[in-house]
Image (cartoon, rainbow, N blue to C red):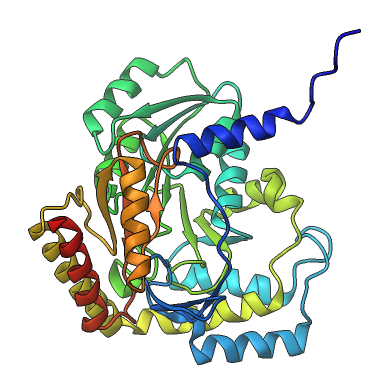
């Protein structure tokens, strides 16, 4: 009798392959001090250049205060999904407040950006639909497109002539609807799309437009309300609370009809327990603060311009970054890990990003800046990068 195959062998095989390719990942428990500082469990302190807490709001006293107030009044959990008993008055009030501030017809809350993107795209498409997405969209949008079972094609990054060619070849009769999917600020390269051109193209070809504004909301645009703000012609505008808002969760801005549709057809919304009151309180406070933080945004962009310019002077490739996300393309995965580890030894936490998150030969350090970084923090980072370059 032949020996049984180990049914768990695929686990070790896959992990060993990841290790050999320098792509193995582990969790690193940290004590987050907000914005610019983290403390590892062994008590070592690092300057944090890997957080999306761009405005340093995760430890803002007003967010903590309102979070505690909402907890005291409504408890620590919502207890059910929104369509059962999980819609408290504070959920509906926050959606109304979001719609008013962002000048949208309606807003709908989701539990995370990943949940939103993997729930909405399958809801608004079917087997007879087509999704045309930028090649550098976030993994959550890719997963949403795959789950949708719609035809899924990618156009060259920010190459709108390529997008138009795909739309022309799609024709007007073959699909029941066509969605164009992009991000205003791309999470790995830090560059921006041309949202006005995308609106123009979507209208020209009668396509629907899904624009993920996650990394722009709070930081870019008028009053920090994102790069989708004030733009007509975007069918779904996605924003998150886990980045510049300093909290957790996500929201979609859309028409009243689209909101009703998502309430009825977006599985992640229908079947998930709603956001807890403490999170709603923190979001509510951040929403009051962000439109008044122009001074902080100006300082953040000064930091960005300084760091990016100096890094480029050192001879590093920062791609077309035009935001608070600054990649340093190293290429080789092992060298990227070594540089990240070297920076950690110097008290700088700069995460390495490797395939499959980015393309092969495009491994990088992903530097994200916060308004909480001081000139001394920035200069220390630049010094260590310069020392590595001279090796």
Q: Residue furthest top?
A: 1
Residue at image x 83%, y 68%?
79
Where residue 294 sits: x, y (%)? 28, 81
Where residue 20 sits: x, y (%)? 48, 35
Residue at image x 29%, y 30%?
156
Task: Check the picture and name the quadrant holding the C terminus.
Answer: bottom left
Instruction: Determine which quarter of the picture holds residue 119.
Output: top right
Task: Check the picture and name the quadrant holding the N terminus.
Answer: top right
Vertical comparison of 259 with 53: above or below = above
Vertical comparison of 67 with 227: above or below = below
Where residue 213 sits: x, y (%)? 40, 56
Q: Is residue 150 left or right of residue 271?
A: left
Q: Residue furthest left?
A: 313
Vertical comparison of 21 with 233: above or below = above
Query: Which is nearer the eye, 379 or 297?
Result: 379
Where residue 142 sits: x, y (%)? 50, 37
Instruction: Determine which quarter of the picture holds residue 4.
Output: top right
Report whether residue 185 is seen.
Answer: no
């Amino acid at each position: 009798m032949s020996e049984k195959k180990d049914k768990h062998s695929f686990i070790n095989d896959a992990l060993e392959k990841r290790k050999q390719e320098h792509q193995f990942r582990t969790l690193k428990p940290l004590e987050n001090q907000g914005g610019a500082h983290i403390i590892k469990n062994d008590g070592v302190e690092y300057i944090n250049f890997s957080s999306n807490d761009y405005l340093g709001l995760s430890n803002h006293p007003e967010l903590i205060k309102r979070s505690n107030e909402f907890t005291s009044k409504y408890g620590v959990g919502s207890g059910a999904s929104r369509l059962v008993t999980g819609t408290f008055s504070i959920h509906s009030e926050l959606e109304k407040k979001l719609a008013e501030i962002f000048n949208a017809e309606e807003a709908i809350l989701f539990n995370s950006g990943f949940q939103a993107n993997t729930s909405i795209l399958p809801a608004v498409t079917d087997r007879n639909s087509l999704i045309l997405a930028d090649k550098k969209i976030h993994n959550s949008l890719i997963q949403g497109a795959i789950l949708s079972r719609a035809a899924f094609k990618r156009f060259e990054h920010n190459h709108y002539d390529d997008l138009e060619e795909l739309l022309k070849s799609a024709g007007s009769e073959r699909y029941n609807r066509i969605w164009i999917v992009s991000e205003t600020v791309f999470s790995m390269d830090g560059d921006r799309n041309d949202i006005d051109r995308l609106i123009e193209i979507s209208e020209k070809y009668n396509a629907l437009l899904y624009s993920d504004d996650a990394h722009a909301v709070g930081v870019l645009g008028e009053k920090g309300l994102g790069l989708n703000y004030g733009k007509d012609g975007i069918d779904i505008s996605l924003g998150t609370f886990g980045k510049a808002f300093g909290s957790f969760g996500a929201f979609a801005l859309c028409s009243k009809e689209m909101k009703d549709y998502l309430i009825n057809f977006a599985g992640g919304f229908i079947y998930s327990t709603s956001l807890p009151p403490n999170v709603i309180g923190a979001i509510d406070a951040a929403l009051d603060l962000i439109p008044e933080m122009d001074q902080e945004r100006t300082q953040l962009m000064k930091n960005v311009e300084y760091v990016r310019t100096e890094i480029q002077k050192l001879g590093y490739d920062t791609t077309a970054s035009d935001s608070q996300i600054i990649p340093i393309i190293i290429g080789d995965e092992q060298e990227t890990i070594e540089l990240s580890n070297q920076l950690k030894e110097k008290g700088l936490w700069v995460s390495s990003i490797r395939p499959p998150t980015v393309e092969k030969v495009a491994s990088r350090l992903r530097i994200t800046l916060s308004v909480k970084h001081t000139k001394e923090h920035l200069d220390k980072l630049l010094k260590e990068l310069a020392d590595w370059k001279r090796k």
